[in-house]
Image (spheres, rainbow, N blue to C red):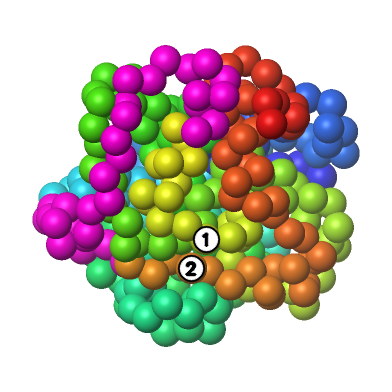
Amino acid sequence: MKLLVLGKRGNVSKSFHDLLSGPAFPTFDADFLSSQDLSALAGDRLDDALDQKRPDVIINGAAYTNVAGAETHFEEALRLNAELPRRLARWCALRDKLLIHFSTDYVYDGQGDAAWTEDSPVNPLNCYGESKLQGDLFIQASGCRHFIFRVSWIYSPHGSNFVTTMLRLGAERETLQVVDDQVGSPTLGYDVALATLRILGKIDLHDSSAVGTYHMTNEGFTSWHGFALAIFAEARKRGLPLRVQTVAPLSTEQFGGAVRRPKNSRLSKQKLGRTFDVQLPAWEDALRRCLNAIVGLPIDAEGPP
């Protein structure tokens, strides 16, 4: 099976690169296009590049993920989050290929405290969520065979994300304030990539019965504040340098900021488990493995108790 992965350095894309560059998935022949590669493929040049690569499956890990930046750079967010998926979906529809695309919990408005299902009404609160929703809608309307996996609170051992930011700030400051009334599932990019590849190994590429939208996150829920406390606890077990002594809870209203964010990002994963018999590990386990990778251990190592 020939795969083309778009993006190389993101929290999910790099995990695809790591997994597909090793011996774990020998039946996949993988190629990659970075975000820089994609930026040069305007107009028909994208179709030409895809025709040259001739993938059976396109895995779209390229995205504009700067939530605050999308408020002032909406056109740029739309280019990557809506226009690129539209063009990929059109190419896949015309050539009967499969598209895998990653969406977000930000397509929901975060009201209430019940877990969102794939059939819940969408109502994004900000420009980032709107740009991602437009991408979802383009794909769904295209007629191409597709999986849209909606993920949340993605992080990894590398790059810029909540875990690496907390470790940096925790090494610099004695006191931090972290929002405690936004709840979701912290999700390790490696686990998303691994689950996606396992699903690809199970399905018939030409069977359309399971195509559609799914939620894919690590199991369990916590707040950003609870997540921060867990990060520092695991970091201390591994001897990482930390000055932080106090992590004070902060409400969304106290935090302020120009961007509205959903308070309830709980996603139900029942459809994913029912359809593919796939369940991602608990978020606490995923965090432990991420910290292992940060200190140089294999990402699946046990690590300290």
* Residue under the image location 18 percent in, 57 percent down: 259
Q: Nearer the viewer, residue 87 or 32?
A: 32
Q: Nearer the viewer, residue 1 or 87?
A: 1
Q: Find numbered disc 2 in the image and state the secondary structure of the residue it sits on.
A: loop
- Residue 225's place in the image compared with 276, above or below, is above
Query: Local crowd at mark 1 within 10 Å, few (<14), some, or many (≥20)?
Result: many
- Please, what is the three-letter code of the amino acid marked with disc 1? Phe
How far apart marks 2 and 1 lie (CA) works out to 7 Å
- Please, what is the three-letter code of the amino acid marked with disc 2? Arg
Q: Is residue 105 visible in the rendered structure shown here?
A: no
Looking at the image, do the residues carrying marks 2 and 1 touch, with CB atoms under 8 Å apart?
Answer: yes
User: Position of 277 compared to 240: left or right?
Assistant: right
Residue 198: give x, y in percent of width and height.
79, 50
Residue 33: give x, y in percent of width and height.
54, 33
Q: Quadrant of the C terminus?
A: top right
Q: Nearer the viewer, residue 69 or 7?
A: 69
Residue indicated by mark 1: 221
* Residue under the image location 61 percent in, 24 percent down: 293
User: Which quarter of the figure has residue 166?
Assistant: top left
- Residue 66's place in the image compared with 304, above or below, is below
Q: Is residue 300 visible in the rendered structure shown here?
A: yes
